[in-house]
Amino acid sequence: MQQPVSEEAIIRFAEFELALKSGELRRNGDIIRLQPQPFKVLVFLASHAGQTVTRQELQQAVWQAETFVDFEHGLNFCIKQIRNALGDDAQSPRLIETLPRRGYRFIAEVEKLNGSSTIDPAREFAKPETERTAQPKSSARMFVLIGVIVIAALIAGYFAWRRPREVAAPQSKVMIAVLPFENLSGDPAEDYFSDGMTEEMIARLGQLQPKSLGVIARTSAMTYKGANKDIARIGRELGVGFVVEGSVRRADDRVRITAQLIQVSDQTHLWSDSYDRSTGDALRVQRQVADQIATALAIELLADKKKEAEGAESAEAVDAYLRGRYLWNKGDRESVSRSVEYFNQAIERDSNYAGAWAGLADAYRLLGMNYAMLPAEAYPKATDAASRAVELDPANADALVSLATIKFRYEWRWDEAEQYFRRALEINPNLGMAHHDYAWFLVAMQRFDEGIEHMKQAQRLDPLSPLANSDVGWVYLMARRYDEAIEQINRTLELEPSFGSALACLERAYTLSGRPREALETLLKETGGPGGISTRDGDPSQTMKSLYRKRLERRLEAMKKVRSSSYSMATTCASAGDREQTFAWLERAFSERDPMLVQARTDPAFDALRSDPRFVTVIKQIGFER
């Protein structure tokens, strides 16, 4: 029988080397990325070159007693990764041959270095299979028994740790990221469906056991779409212990969904499964997959799991909804406007589809926020849609956040707004949007410490989102904590160097902290810098005023062509020192019920105007006391 390969050995075949001690696969000296589990499979196959290795042998040697593994899918994944790394073709293999219904055979000549002799594939292949599998069964059973006992102890300890009334600190949560589901349909037009699967999976996982399971938000997860990054790096960047990968293949009226759960620490596959359904069952499949993952993590499901909405959404309604969400997530005016059409189509096909009503509410309030529609036109429509969604599904957290934001930014009804925010977070503490919008409410109420904490929570749930990171800086700025704002925004600009909101915040923070030169340099980056002006010439503070006026003139010209927030215009005028224009834009913002106007009470841009009776009047009209 072939002796076990030493951990010090190097296995060489073709142009490749396997360094067992370092766990590296090399090709002509260059390291090729291969996750630990596929690496173990490749080592086992290469160590038994020329022999038929059954799937059962691989299971016993590589997976052993890991109880949460769907072995068949795990092995198929490993073989696929190995073939990709080696550039081997399953149809005409030169390294690994698949033996249908039997297993695999490593057919390349293998050399073991560090004192080991060359393996003769023909001689090894001639050995009877029983000789290679003659390990005592009692020993195997003992390993399985020990594994079961250890895992049972871990699960028992986990639930003991989660005794009633013991609330874990936020950092003790199990953190998981759902990577973008891969579109295997071969048609880019189907991306909306795979992206929709990703978003629905994130939402579903976020509501399973929110006190114990934290889920990274969509914005950060989608940065990995099409990216070739290893799991360990993704885990470090997102601060997660587990990652879900998946794929979607649609054909006619059928959909095949595959998902797998990977532990970041050692990149082992804890669970995987596939589902073949009609497209009309897509949302139900997502829920099943999420529940399976939760079971694999040994997380107790909510005892009071809400009932499914009565009446199955039609396949056409689901398809229209997913197309709408795909466009809404793009965020630009044109895409969000188009998303309204698809949400309405979904509602036409199923008027009891709460998700479609919630999507429509999100679309209208975003259109009102960015002035694609006047707020007085957009927000009443958003109110109707969100109210309908909550009527159909009282636990729809997205719709509750919409209602909260409408009460806060448009109706100026503070108590009701906070009630809706709190209810949404009670239902889904993992909803980053709820923390983000509630943070701005708390800042407007001058509850800065609470606002900062909720914005940081939004950032923790969406760590790669430029908006979430930038808005942490903005709430620091509103709290007059300018140094912390500058530090945060500089970190944000490492993620997205040209992100406009971050540059605007940095410019303001430098100005308010008395650093005019840095403010001017930031402004030049933000605007492109008008010709003929240098930061080395003249008084920076005077040059700053000149640049602000030039920017104001450009913005006023742009306003003739494209609607912009009147409140943003007012802050620009205030920063430029143009008091009369500031009040003209503030009055216009009030008449339009600009959703940004609620920030006026705490915005440092207006500190020089707070004693002006006109400003006091605006604040009182909004509903704030002086």
Image: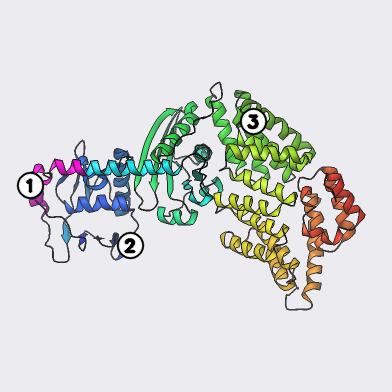
Q: Where does label 3 land, which residue?
A: 357
Distance between mark 1 and mark 3 Cα atoms: 67 Å
Distance between mark 3 and mark 2 Cα atoms: 51 Å
Residue at the spot 60% in from the left edge and 49% down from the top edge: 458
Work out whether mark 1 precedes mark 3 in sequence or the reverse, and give the earlier one: 1
- Quarter of the rendering containing residue 603: bottom right
Q: Bin the neighbour count of mark 3 within 10 Å (Cα to Cα): few under 14, some 14-19, many 20 and up.
A: many
Residue 31, numbered label: 2
Q: Nearer the viewer, residue 481 or 335?
A: 481
Q: Is residue 539 visible?
A: yes
Residue at the extreme right? 613
Q: In the figure, is residue 519 to the left or right of 323? A: right
Report the label total: 3
- Quarter of the rendering containing residue 399: top right
Q: Where does label 1 land, which residue?
A: 126
State whether residue 71 is above or below residue 534: above
Magenta stretch contains residue 409: no
Q: Secondary structure at mark 3?
A: helix
Work out whether mark 1 precedes mark 2 in sequence or the reverse, and give the earlier one: 2
Residue 502: x and y in percent read 66, 59
Residue type highlighted by circle 1: Ala
Residue 220: x and y in percent read 54, 50
Residues shaded magenta: 114-142
Magenta stretch contains residue 135: yes
Work out whether mark 3 precedes mark 2 in sequence or the reverse, and give the earlier one: 2
Residue type highlighted by circle 2: Ile
Residue at the extreme top? 311
